Image: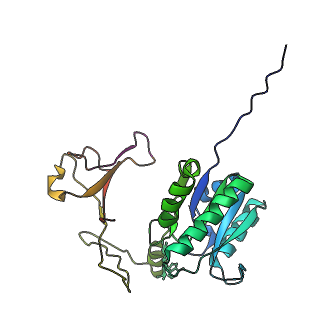
């Protein structure tokens, strides 16, 4: 009888890992697990020679690997941060090549990936160039610079009925707004939140999590939050 060897092919993962604002102690356990599980870590550097002498991200990653007691292949990703499409294409190409050569990859970004990070520009390009890798990406949330700043200042960012505004100091174009809508009343009709590009998050990361890519009609749980995303091209 012929032996049949089944080749188990594990899907290669791409973790977009938020590093927090600078202190390795502000990394999440999810970030540490991604570092432990991946085959290589892509780290942006502003240095043309691909050195990491000025890289805050590299320092956090090496501190994290020391903490985990493991070593990983570190791949520099030249990121001049000039808001230039060709730079993002070059960066995405490095990530795609790294996944082909090494396997599962982490790409790291400072603070939280939701806030002014290039990862979504890179992901748009990766989607066009390597759909199978794109299908296996995961974003790992992190501590934002302003959450950390609030903790350092020992002052709340919003209390009672206050709202919080995040503004780009030097916008290049018209400023569009994403709204985060929190603290609903149970039973409320969401009609008054208006229309737009909504997501609804109920019991996120908890039992009975429901993520709806639109606005639910009636709120049934206090742990509900809405994101009304800025209109993007
Ligand atoms: C490209 S944005 C990235 C923001 C980041 N993703 C976050 O969640 O905070 C870079 C800006 O974040 C702020 N920032 C990030 N880390 C910081 C830190 N450790 N201290 C002060 N400001 C910081 C500064 O305003 C900086 O110009």
Of 122 and 214, the residue lying toward us? 122
Of 149 and 124, the residue lying toward us? 124
Q: Quadrant of the N terminus?
A: top right
Q: Is residue 70 above or below residue 211?
A: below
**Residue 215 in picture, x, y percent from top left:** 25, 50
**Residue 176 in picture, x, y percent from top left:** 29, 72
**Residue 178 in picture, x, y percent from top left:** 31, 67
Query: How many callouts does the rendering have?
Result: 0
The residue positioned 36% from the left and 83% from the top of the image is: 171
Q: Image quarter for residue 227?
A: bottom left
Q: Image quarter for residue 40?
A: bottom right
Look at the magenta stretch and give its main secondary structure: loop
**Residue 18 in picture, x, y percent from top left:** 55, 65
Q: Is residue 187 left or right of residue 5?
A: left
Q: Is residue 150 left or right of residue 96?
A: left
Query: Would residue 208 be counted in the magenta stretch?
Result: yes
Q: Is residue 195 visible?
A: yes
């Amino acid at each position: 009888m012929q032996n049949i060897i089944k080749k188990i092919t594990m899907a290669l993962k791409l973790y977009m890992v938020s590093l927090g604002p600078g202190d390795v102690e502000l990394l999440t356990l999810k970030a540490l697990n991604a570092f432990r599980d991946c085959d290589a870590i892509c780290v942006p550097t502003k240095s043309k020679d691909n050195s990491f002498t000025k890289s805050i991200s590299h320092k956090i990653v090496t501190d994290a690997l020391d903490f985990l007691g493991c070593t990983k292949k570190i791949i520099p990703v030249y990121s001049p941060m000039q808001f230039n499409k060709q730079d993002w294409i070059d960066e995405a190409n490095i990530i795609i090549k790294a996944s082909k050569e090494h396997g599962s990859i982490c790409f790291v970004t400072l603070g939280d990936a939701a806030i002014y990070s290039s990862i979504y520009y890179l992901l748009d390009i990766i989607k066009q160039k390597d759909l199978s890798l794109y299908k296996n990406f995961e974003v790992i949330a992190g501590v934002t610079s302003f959450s950390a700043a609030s903790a350092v200042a020992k002052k709340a960012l919003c209390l009672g009925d206050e709202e919080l505004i995040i503004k780009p100091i030097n916008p290049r174009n018209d400023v569009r707004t994403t709204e985060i809508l929190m603290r609903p009343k149970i039973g409320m009709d969401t009609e008054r939140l208006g229309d737009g590009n909504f997501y609804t998050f109920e019991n996120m990361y908890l039992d009975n999590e429901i993520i709806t890519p639109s606005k639910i009609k009636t709120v049934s749980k206090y742990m509900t939050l809405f994101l009304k995303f800025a209109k993007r091209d």
